[in-house]
Each structure stands twice: as C-alpha cells, then as structure tokens.
Image: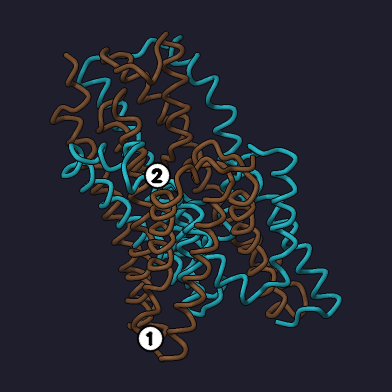
Chain colours: A cyan, B brown
C-alpha cells in the first residue's frame, strides 16, 4: 500500500517532467515560430558563463530546501521559484498558524496547500498585472513614485513579520544565528543570502542542540 | 520587426505557462484536501491556510511584478513575465540575459530588435535555470527518506526533532534579518535606518495583532495577521520616506 507521501512523490515527478517540457517549449517555440536559430557558438559562450554558478547553486538549493518544504511543497516550489523570498516563508507561517509539525502528514498537507495557494496567487498577480496594468505600472514603480519605498522594503517587512512570531517563541535559539549572520555581513557586506542560509541554519541547529543537551531548552 | 517580442504568439506561450502552473497547483490542493478530510482535519484550518497563504503572497508578488517591468524595456514584457512565472527570480534572469547580450555585443539598457538574439537569450535563461527541475525527480524522495530515518533513529526523537525543525526555520529567517541589519544585497536597498525601521515595524505589528487575537479571541483575524503586519510595515516605509527627507540614504554599509 502506497502512503500519501509516496503518492506525492509519484505525482511530483510526473508534474516536474511535464514542467521541464513546458519550460523548453518557450525558447523552442520562439526559435521555430520566428525561424531564429541561435548560433551554437554564441549560445555556448553565453551558457558557459552562467551554467557553473547556476547549476552549482541548484544543487545547494535542492539539498537545502527539500528537507524544509515537504514532498508536495518541494515539487511545486521549484517549478514556480522565488523560494527563499516567498514559498518557504509562506509554508513556515502556514505550519505555524495551523499548529502542525512539519514532519507529520498534516504538516505535509498544510505546506503543500500553502505553497500551491501562494503559487496561484503569484502567477495570477503577475498575469493580471502584465495584462491590465502594464501601461500604468512604470509610473507606480518609478524611482520617484510615492509608493516605491513600499516595494523596496518588502523583504524586511516580510521577514520582520515572520520572525516576530518565531523569535518570541524561541528567542534563546534565535540569538546565535542572527549574530552569526550579522558577523558574516560585517566581514563581507555583499555575501549572497542563499549561501548565508547554510551558515545560519548550521549555527542555529548546533546552538539548539547544545542548549538542549545543557537543559536550557525543553520544548 | 521589433514587436515580435510582444506578438500574439508570445502571449499564447505565456498563457500556456500560466495555465500549467495554475492547474498543477490546483491538482496538489485537491489531492491534499482529500487526504486531509480522510485524516479528519478541520475544513476551517484548510480554508485559513489557503486564505492566509494567498494574502501573504500578495506583496511579494507585486514586487516580482515590478521586476518583470525592469526587464521589459530590453526584452519586451512577455519573456520576463514567462521567466519570472516559472523558476525565475530577478537576479538569475537578469544575469542570464545580460550574459547572453554581452556575448552578442549588446546590453540590457538597449532594446533587443533581432529575433535570433532574442531566442539566444530565451535559451540561455531556460537552460541556465532548469537544473533544479532535472535534479528533483532523482533526489527529492531520497533526501526525504534519509531525513525520516535520521529523525526516527535518535532517542527523544519527538521533542528534539521539533526543536531542530524550529532551529532550521529560525536559521533561514535569521539570514534575512541579518541582511537587513548589516548586509548590502545586490537586489535591494543596503542595510540602514529604513531596513531596520521596516523590520521593527513589521515585528511590532505582528506582536500587537497576535496579542489582540488572543485577548479578544478573534479567530477570524488570525490568517490576516502577517499580511496586515507586512502591508503596515510597508506603509510605514512610505511614510518615513515622505516625512524624513534623505532617510533612504541613511545606510551604514
């Protein structure tokens, strides 16, 4: 008898392979429709400067995010992207609000529903924005627009809101990783946040493990 | 022929991608919902998850939309729209497009007028960003089952598992908080008065709204706490920039 998580993996694999097909239909469509075949040497030169970093990052991302997102959530998140700045925080906050454990089957269900809802919302907001508001949007997001700062500071607003609920519950665990992150940024101000995640997650887990062994934290 | 970038054909491609992503997400919601009912989970909890996740995604979605526009002057609006709807994120797509244009002897500051250049960019963006999807069918299940074994092996697996799970999440949030306090991101404003003020406002709003929910027993308000706090903090950012001239330039990095 297949468990629900096993089924998620089967569906996820089918959808992921289909997603790759859909993804490649775009450049293939452009090439065939406009009869515009790129020169192999040009494409190769462009790719060779992109692939080493992107594909290495891809391996790191798959290893880092897969354990955190759940099965269904992982397959969905990697198709629509924007994982660190949207899908992951969205799943975290949903798990927190529903008061279920990430590793339980309920957690799997909640994170999948959360990420799917987030994907639909994002896709539709972008689509509606492009189709209806394309003519007026440049004025809204122009550098001198009054509400431009709102979009500049989405990340602090998002992680401040998300952090508040986690930190108030687990303040002992929170101090070390924040401190570690700040120290890294003092030494290397433009350090990529995707790589920093590795550092802060390891520090956070090591710190929590230490505090648990010392009896500082019990639940 | 310069309007090929926004032809009906390009829009058809974009709508195909939008339809695919939407159908896939609906499929997973339906399957999860059915399983949740079998397990006896409350419908209210599931509904709240959908509502709060959708609301939570609004502000970031609008900021992604803004990045579509940033690429639109060179590439037309449709290709950036497609690329940021699937896998894409601004940093990746911009760098991929710039690399391709550089090889072609051009840059993102000027409009692409040659269909061959355009297709070269489309191929570069797609091949560059597709790798996670190729890895997932092979790795996802392996990683999850390895994780399951690791957590079930240790004694006190339950309590310790919960603590370590929370610690991993806190690690993620900590990286972004640290960036707001001391970082110089490539895709946003540097750490300074504004990033910290927005961060703190969001925290204060969240704590205050959480307290309000608990004190007045407002179950209905709970899914809205994070989105309201986010929009509230973004509103504070707009106000501060209007009221304190030059505050956006007060950065310490």
For residue A179, say whether it is visible.
yes
Q: Which mark is in front, 2 or 1?
A: 1
Q: x, y (%) of residue B110?
A: 33, 16
Residue in view at x 40 percent, y 87 percent: B40
Q: Which residue is mark 1?
A: B219
Q: Which residue is mark 2?
A: A17
**From the viewer's perspective, is residue A46 above or below residue B155?**
above
- SS at mark 2 in the image: helix
Dot 1: few (<14), some (14–19), or many (≥20) neighbours within 10 Å?
few
Q: Nearer the viewer, residue B240 or B74?
A: B240
Q: Nearer the viewer, residue A63 or A155?
A: A155
Q: x, y (%) of residue B182?
A: 65, 47
Residue at mark 1: chain: B
Give residue A213's quadrant in the image: bottom right
**A117 to the left or right of B13:** right
For residue A2, say whether it is visible.
no
Residue in view at x 24 percent, y 20 percent: A32
Q: Nearer the viewer, residue B171 or A156?
A: A156
Residue B84's disc number: none
Give residue A212's quadrant in the image: bottom right
Quadrant showing the C terminus of chain A: bottom right
Q: x, y (%) of residue B148?
A: 64, 67
- SS at mark 1 in the image: helix
Dot 2: few (<14), some (14–19), or many (≥20) neighbours within 10 Å?
some
């Amino acid at each position: 008898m297949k468990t629900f998580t096993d089924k998620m993996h089967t569906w996820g694999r089918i959808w992921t392979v289909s997603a790759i097909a859909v993804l490649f239909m775009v450049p293939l469509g452009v090439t065939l429709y406009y009869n515009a075949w790129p020169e192999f040497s040009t494409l190769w030169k462009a790719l060779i400067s992109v692939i080493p970093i992107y594909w290495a990052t891809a391996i790191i991302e798959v290893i880092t995010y897969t354990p955190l997102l759940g099965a269904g959530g992982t397959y969905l998140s990697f198709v629509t992207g924007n994982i660190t700045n949207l899908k992951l925080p969205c799943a975290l906050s949903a798990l927190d609000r529903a008061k279920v454990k990430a590793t339980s089957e309920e957690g799997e269900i909640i994170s999948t529903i959360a990420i799917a809802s987030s994907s639909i919302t994002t896709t539709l907001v972008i689509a509606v924005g492009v189709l209806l508001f394309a003519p007026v949007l440049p004025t809204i997001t122009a550098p001198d627009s009054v509400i431009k700062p709102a979009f500049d500071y989405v990340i602090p607003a998002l992680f401040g809101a998300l952090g508040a609920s986690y930190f108030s519950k687990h303040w002992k665990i929170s101090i070390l990783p924040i401190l570690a992150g700040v120290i890294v940024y003092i030494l290397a101000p433009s350090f990529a946040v995707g790589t920093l995640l590795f550092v802060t997650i390891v520090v956070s887990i090591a710190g929590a493990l230490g505090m648990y062994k010392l009896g500082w934290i019990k639940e | 022929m310069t309007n090929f970038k926004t032809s009906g054909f390009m829009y058809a491609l974009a709508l195909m991608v939008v339809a695919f992503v939407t159908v896939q997400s609906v499929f997973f919601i339906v399957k999860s919902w059915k399983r949740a009912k079998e397990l006896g989970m409350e419908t209210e909890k599931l509904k709240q998850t959908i509502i709060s996740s959708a609301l939570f995604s609004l502000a970031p979605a609008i900021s992604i939309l803004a990045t579509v526009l940033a690429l639109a002057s060179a590439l037309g609006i449709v290709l950036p729209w497609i690329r940021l709807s699937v896998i894409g994120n601004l940093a990746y797509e911009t760098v991929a497009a710039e690399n391709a244009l550089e090889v072609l002897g051009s840059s993102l500051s000027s409009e692409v007028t040659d269909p061959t250049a355009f297709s070269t960019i489309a191929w570069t963006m797609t091949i560059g960003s597709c790798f996670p999807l190729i890895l997932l069918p092979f790795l996802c299940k392996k990683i999850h089952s390895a994780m399951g074994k690791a957590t079930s092996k240790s004694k006190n697996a339950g309590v310790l598992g919960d603590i370590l799970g929370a610690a991993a999440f806190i690690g993620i949030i900590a990286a972004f908080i640290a960036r707001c306090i001391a970082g110089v991101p490539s895709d946003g404003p540097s750490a300074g008065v504004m990033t910290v003020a927005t961060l703190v406002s969001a925290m204060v709003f969240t704590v205050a709204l959480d307290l309000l929910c608990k004190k007045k027993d407002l179950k209905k308000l709970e899914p809205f706490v994070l989105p309201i706090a986010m929009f509230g903090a973004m509103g504070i950012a707009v106000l501060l920039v209007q009221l304190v001239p030059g505050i956006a330039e007060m950065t310490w990095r």
